Structure formats: C-alpha cells, structure tokens
Image (spheres, rainbow, N blue to C red):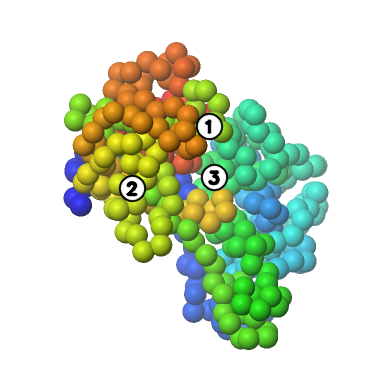
C-alpha cells in the first residue's frame, strides 16, 4: 500500500490540528488536578451539546475561554497543558454573556451572545453548514458548533474544541455501567468512568471509519450522495470498519456494497477526528477495477464519475456542491483534482 507522490494531501486537515500536550500522566494525579483548577492561569472551555462560545476580532475567530471562577459548574475534563496554562472543558449550559471587566484571553465580547446561523443552519452544534467570517459579527460572542467554526478557529482552539466535543459526547451516552447498570463515576480528569459496584473501568470510545476517493483507469473520481441529501450535494464514499476487519478490507467492502464497484490498491493518505459523535475518519485513495455503478438504494441515491473538467464545470454552474473544507472528504477531492476548489454545501 504505497502512496504516490502526487497523492500527498493538499492543505491541512482542519479538525486534526492542536497545540496542547494532552498530559495523560497527570490525569490520575488528583492533587495536581485540584491545584491546576485553582490556578489563576487555567482556562476553561464550556461545552453544551457540542456547542461553545466564539468571538471574532477582524479576521481572527477564537473560542471564549473562562477562568475557573467564571466557569459554570459541571463535569470537568482535563484537555491538557501548554506552557504554564492548563486547559479544561466543563460540560454545562453556556453562559448568556461573559462576565464584564474580567480580562481573559481572546477578543473582548460584545454585550450579548447571539446564535450563529449560517445559510440553512441553526444553533445546533451538529449542523452541517459551516460559518464564514461574515456570519460572525465582529466583536460579538456567538454560540456555534464544531462543524460551523472548526475551519475558522486557530490551531489551539480547534484542537481544544474537537477534544471537548468528543469527550462530552462520550460522557453523555455512558453514564451507566454496561455490566450491571450502576451509575459510573468520572475519574482520570474525565478520561475514565468507573463502576462503583463492580469496579469495571470504561474508556472513551472511538469508531474508525474509512472514507475513500475511488479513481478509474481514466483518472476520473467517483462522487455520490445518500438518500437523505438534497440534489447536488455529492461527496466520496465512506463507511465504518467492522469487527475483525482491516482498514484496507473495509475500503474494498464498502465500495462494493454501496456502488457495486470492485477496487484494488487502497492507499492511506491521512486521518482526522469527526466527533459526531465519535468517529475517526481514515482517508484513502483506491483504484477501480470495474466502473459500472450499481448503487445500493438504501445507502446511495446517486453516483457518478467525474473528470476534472466535468467537476469544475459542475461547480461553476452550481449543479454540484462539495463537502465543506472542514471535512476530510473535501481534502481528498482537492488532492485528486490538484488544487483548491470552490462550491461548498
């Protein structure tokens, strides 16, 4: 499985960024956790159903970070350390406004928090449509989810938000022991839940999924859409890795199941977390052995081959829209194309 030189990913994977040290050795040190929480330098990201507060100053968008005195009560998760600053997430309802006259990192918030709404989007943290700078009022604090602002945040804040969203989603669905049903207790800085009845330990779950750009012998790429997507929104194929299955076998199986095409030579290009709620997307290219499309009607409503010229024309006309830049699908498509493309969902 060798990646060709021309198949090196174009551009960064926007949800695979981060600057902090996750500091796993400190998670079990309860005394250090208490000292860190009491430190004036510590900063807290508040997370509520996948959403947080962000603000913009000019062309810079930042997550709003609180001191521990400002943060609302809630479950705490240690995110890590950078320099002398410890970072935590707290799962709690988002404050309506930031406390006045208290210096915290980042731009000064406006007088009120307003929900961020992109085209076709709402305030839900799981919405698909990303925000642009024009959607975030300069100087105001807005409520937004990872899909909306993951591509606008800097490396540190993007990494913090991805991490916090993933931990919150896991905790929200794993409150009880799967063995005996007892309510579990949060330990290790939010990275373990322990059953007080049978002492079993439970760790955050990650579901690996392969996502693959299929190329034919004419170097066309295959794009498709699911039945739940509107006309014109196409992407590449993807699917979860099954128990006892390698990533390469998952690529071959998923393409055959979804569109009836045989593929060979799967090549890994990169990965990024996709915590909706707990996926890790592993990106591949694969070569089509056959080209006749036989879609599985339950999973695929439409699938088509595109040359580079056909893709560019479809984007220009508005007939086709691509996944947003925050997705690994977009990066794989642009890598095949050979450069940036326009026409987001």
Label 3 and label 2: CA atoms lie apart by: 31 Å
Q: Using the rendered view, name the quadrant where residue 170 is placed.
A: bottom right
Q: Dot 2: what SS?
A: helix
Element under disc 1: loop
Crowd around label 2: few <14 · some 14–19 · many ≥20 (10 Å): some
Is residue 195 depicted above or below 93 in this figure?
below
**Which callout, 3 or 2, points at the residue further toward the start of the chain?**
3
Q: In this view, does 159 lie to the left or right of 46?
A: left
Q: For the image shown, how many numbered marks are present on the structure?
A: 3
Q: Earlier in the sequence, mark 1 or mark 2?
A: 1
Residue drawn at the location 40% of the way across and 32% of the way down? 295
Callout 3: 10 Å neighbours few (<14), some, many (20+)?
A: many
Give the labeled residue for mark 1: 227
Question: Quadrant of the rendered structure where residue 122 is?
Answer: top right
Please identify, in this view, whether the residue under mark 3 or under mark 1 is nearer the observer: 1
Task: Determine whether the residue tagged by mark 3 lies in a helix, strand or loop.
Answer: loop
Task: Examine the rendered structure and indicate whether residue 88 appears above or below residue 28.
Answer: above
Question: In x, y percent, where is residue 255?
Answer: 34, 41
Residue 105: image tag: none
- Rendering coords of residue 337 (x, y %): 30, 29
The residue carrying pointer 1 sits among few (fewer than 14), some (14 to 19) or many (20 or more) residues within 10 Å by Cα, namely few
Up the image or down, 73 lies above or below 54; here it is: below
Please tell me which residue is depicted at 41% across the width and 62% down the height of the picture.
243
Q: Please tell me which residue is depicted at 57% across the width and 54% down the height of the picture.
A: 277
- For disc 2, the marked residue is 253
Q: Which residue is drawn at 41% across and 57% down?
A: 242
Residue under numbered circle 3: 150
Residue 164 position by quadrant = bottom right
């Amino acid at each position: 499985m060798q990646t060709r030189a021309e198949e090196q990913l174009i551009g960064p994977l926007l949800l695979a960024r981060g600057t902090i040290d996750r500091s796993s050795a400190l998670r079990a040190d309860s005394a250090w956790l208490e000292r860190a929480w009491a430190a004036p330098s510590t900063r807290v990201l508040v997370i509520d159903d996948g959403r947080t507060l962000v603000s913009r100053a000019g062309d810079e968008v930042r997550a709003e970070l609180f001191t521990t005195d400002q943060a609302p009560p809630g479950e705490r998760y240690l995110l890590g350390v950078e320099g002398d600053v410890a970072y935590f997430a707290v799962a709690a309802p988002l404050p309506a406004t930031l406390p006045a006259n208290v210096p915290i990192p980042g731009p000064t918030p406006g007088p009120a928090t307003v929900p961020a709404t992109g085209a076709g989007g709402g305030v839900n943290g799981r919405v698909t449509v990303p925000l642009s700078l024009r959607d975030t009022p300069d100087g105001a604090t807005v409520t937004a989810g990872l899909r909306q602002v993951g591509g606008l945040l800097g490396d540190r804040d993007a990494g913090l938000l991805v991490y916090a969203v993933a931990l919150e989603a896991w905790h929200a669905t794993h409150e009880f022991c799967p063995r005996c049903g007892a309510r579990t207790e949060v330990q290790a800085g939010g990275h373990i839940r322990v059953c007080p009845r049978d002492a079993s330990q439970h760790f955050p779950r990650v579901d690996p999924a392969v996502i693959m750009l299929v190329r034919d012998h004419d170097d066309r790429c295959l794009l498709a859409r699911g039945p739940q997507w509107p006309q014109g929104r196409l992407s590449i194929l993807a699917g979860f890795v099954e128990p006892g299955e390698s990533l390469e076998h998952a690529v071959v199986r998923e393409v055959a199941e979804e569109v009836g095409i045989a593929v060979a030579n799967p090549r890994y290009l990169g990965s990024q977390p996709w915590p909706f709620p707990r996926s890790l997307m592993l990106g591949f290219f694969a070569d089509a052995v056959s080209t006749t499309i036989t879609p599985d009607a339950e999973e695929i409503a439409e699938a088509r081959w595109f040359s580079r010229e056909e893709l560019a024309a479809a984007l220009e006309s508005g007939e086709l829209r691509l996944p947003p830049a925050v997705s690994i699908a977009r990066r794989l498509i642009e890598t095949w194309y050979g450069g940036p493309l326009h026409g987001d969902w």
